[in-house]
Amino acid sequence: MKKRRPTIPFSGWMLAVDLEETRKIQNQKGTPAYGCDCDLCTEWKLAYKKIIPEKLLDEFGRAGVELQSPTDLYGSGSGDEERTIRVTFHFIGKILSGLNGATHDDRFDYDGFPYEVVRDNPYFSVRVIPQQETYVSAPNCEAKGNSRVLCIDMRLGYPAKYVCENA
Ligand SMILES: [Zn+2]
């Protein structure tokens, strides 16, 4: 039986997503954010629907990525301060088109695959990158055929009030 691998637009990318394989690697035990109850992870679960632009929320859903369960999440900010976080997710599939190749990100003084700035305020940037091109943690998994383990990597800010409004 041919596995379903729909083509899904995701921000500036066009992705082919192995839905079944992707489902298996969501919320995987042992990943850094698995079961984490630190303040930022707790806030993420409360407020991610406000933090992520609506169009992307929909695209994440179509890709079968479980937004309440990041692979990893870390950052800074607490109390009334704005938070600045990096949050990563993984899926299995293929990048059909979109930004690729090394560039320089001035905001984070970073050489590598580019982030696409989706929103300036609150700042929200995202990139889709083959896991093997990153240094981030990934679920324990292998991709078969011409599929690869791919990382959705977001760097973003959000105001503390997002959390209070959800509390
Ligand atoms: Zn955490």
Image: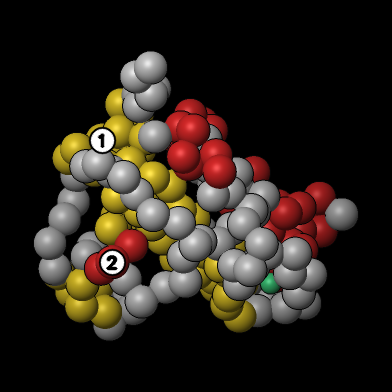
Q: Name the residue under label 2.
A: 132
From the image, which quarter does the C terminus lie in?
Answer: bottom right
Per the image, the residue denoted by label 1 is 14
Q: How many marks?
A: 2
From the viewer's perspective, tell me whether residue 63 is left or right of residue 28.
left
Query: Is residue 81 toward the left or the right of residue 58 in the image?
Result: right
Identify the residue shown where x is 38% and y is 24%. 3
Q: In which quadrant of the rendered view does residue 160 lie?
A: bottom right
Q: Position of residue 30 (x, y in %)?
A: 63, 68
Foreground: 133 or 113?
Answer: 133
Amino acid type, residue under disc 2 in the picture: Gln
Report the front residue among 115 and 63.
Answer: 63
Q: Does 36 sit left or right of 67 as displayed?
A: right
The furthest residue to the right: 167
Q: In terms of sequence position, does the residue under pointer 1 or pointer 2 come before the other?
A: 1
Task: Check disc 1 and give the amino acid type.
Answer: Met
- Nearest to the observer: residue 62 or residue 1: 1
Q: In this view, does 110 lie above or below 6?
A: below
